Image (cartoon, helix red, strand yellow):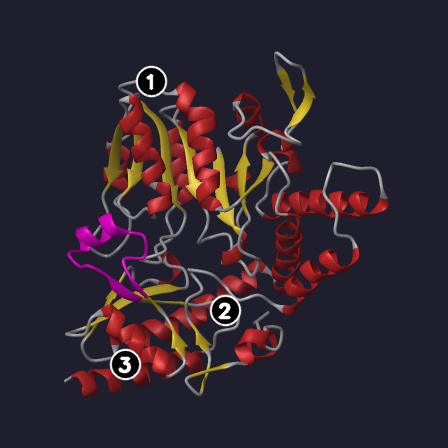
Amino acid sequence: MSLNAQKIREDFPILERKVHGKPLVYFDNAATTQKPRQVIEAMNDYYRNYNANVHRAVHSLSAEASNAWEQAHEKAAKFVGAKSWDEMVFTKNATEAINLVAYSLLKKQLKAGDEILLTKMEHHSNLVPWQQLALAHGLKVNFANVRSNGTLDTEDFEKKLSKKTKLVAFTNCSNVLGTINPAEHLIKVAHEFDALVLVDGAQSTPHMPVDVRNMDADFFVFSAHKMLGPTGIGALYAKKDLLERMEPFLYGGDMIAEVFLDHTVFNKLPWRFEAGTPNIAEGIGLSAAIDYLQKLGMENVREHEKKVMAVALRALHESEGVTVYGPDEIEKRSGVVSFNLKGIHPHDVASILDRYGIAVRSGDHCGQPLMRELGIKGTARASFYVYNTPDEIKLMAEVLHKAKQFMG
């Protein structure tokens, strides 16, 4: 079944607006996606009809809110293939989820001399927490190389694993290169050295089917706002036995079962990791976003993006003076393409496109170490989703041609 992008666009109010008098073409989906009416209305319905705190009272509004909050956990767990919803912890975003793992489990488990293995294509949020943990506790961080074609050097990855490797963390899909990493293989070889594995799924969960059990990930993180949901909420999946070993990252209300003057008994999973009043409306928005994506079918979402990406790669490769980064094989990349236009700064490229209503990202994309590896300071980045069409990509190519002529 093919997605009907034109029909899908009718669900997104923001796509009706104009920018500089031009119809909005939104190609910044890797940063955040737009929200369909169904998500907006679900959040408004909560505030209008059953706004109350969760797990705090027995009155009807609180019971309804608590039920919706718990259903959101259940849907998120099923969406990524978790065994049960008590393996699904809601956080502020994927970044907080990574930090939760770093400080709730590994801070006490790792010792000086232990090693962490990352890749050189990591987003800062999956690099800086481990870097800082290593600096504070005498750990060593190793990095697997990236090949010239934008794919991970899996041989180098395997060579850098050892019995000292206690944690491996890598992105499922690169937010810069679009590269889809072979998660199952990487996890398998890491587990052969008894290393725990965290997968950054911020760029994969919105775009393709994910199954954390088939993958055998120990930890998996993602954010709602990159998958049609609201900002301010993300999720951590972790195997239950690992969650049971982890100390809470934050302390306060709702993460407790009993409190005495001299000690506290923590709540059951996953609530012990969700201290204080949570982002209730945002959780309900995530729930509605999952409903929307499941109705479309994640296989269909993936196929649509492959078709759109094929048009984008062809158009960019045929454009004079354009350098494209990342693998050319459609099967090896997600709906993200970074590029540079010779002689024109990425910010200028983005500004020119904006004058035609086309929104792209420019800069280092929270991947400064990768930019240094590529020998550049930044790129322009177009990233696609379910509401984008080939005609929009053709328009972008036409504007890039005009930009090249205009800038000489």
Secondary structure of the residue carrying tag 3 is helix
Magenta highlight on residue 107:
no
- Which tag is nearer the camera, tag 2 or tag 3? 3
The residue carrying pointer 1 sits among few (fewer than 14), some (14 to 19) or many (20 or more) residues within 10 Å by Cα, namely some
List the residue tagged with mark 3. Answer: 400
List the residue tagged with mark 2. Answer: 304
Indicate which disc residue 213 carries.
Answer: none
Comes first in the chain, label 2 or label 3: 2
**Could you say which is closer to the camera, residue 165 or residue 95?**
95
Amino acid type, mark 1: Lys
CA–CA distance between discs 2 and 3?
Answer: 24 Å
Q: Quadrant of the C terminus?
A: bottom left
Residue lying farthest top? 262
Secondary structure of the residue carrying tag 1 is loop
CA–CA distance between discs 3 and 1?
Answer: 52 Å
The image shows residue 111, relative to residue 12, as above or below, that is: above
Picture residue at 38% right of the left edge, 71% below the top: 310
Picture residue at 14% right of the left edge, 74% below the top: 343
Amino acid type, mark 3: Leu
Image quadrant of residue 157?
top left
Q: Give the range drawn in magenta.
A: 362-380
Image quadrant of residue 10?
bottom right
Image quadrant of residue 167?
top left
CA–CA distance between discs 1 and 2?
Answer: 46 Å
List the residue tagged with mark 1. Answer: 111
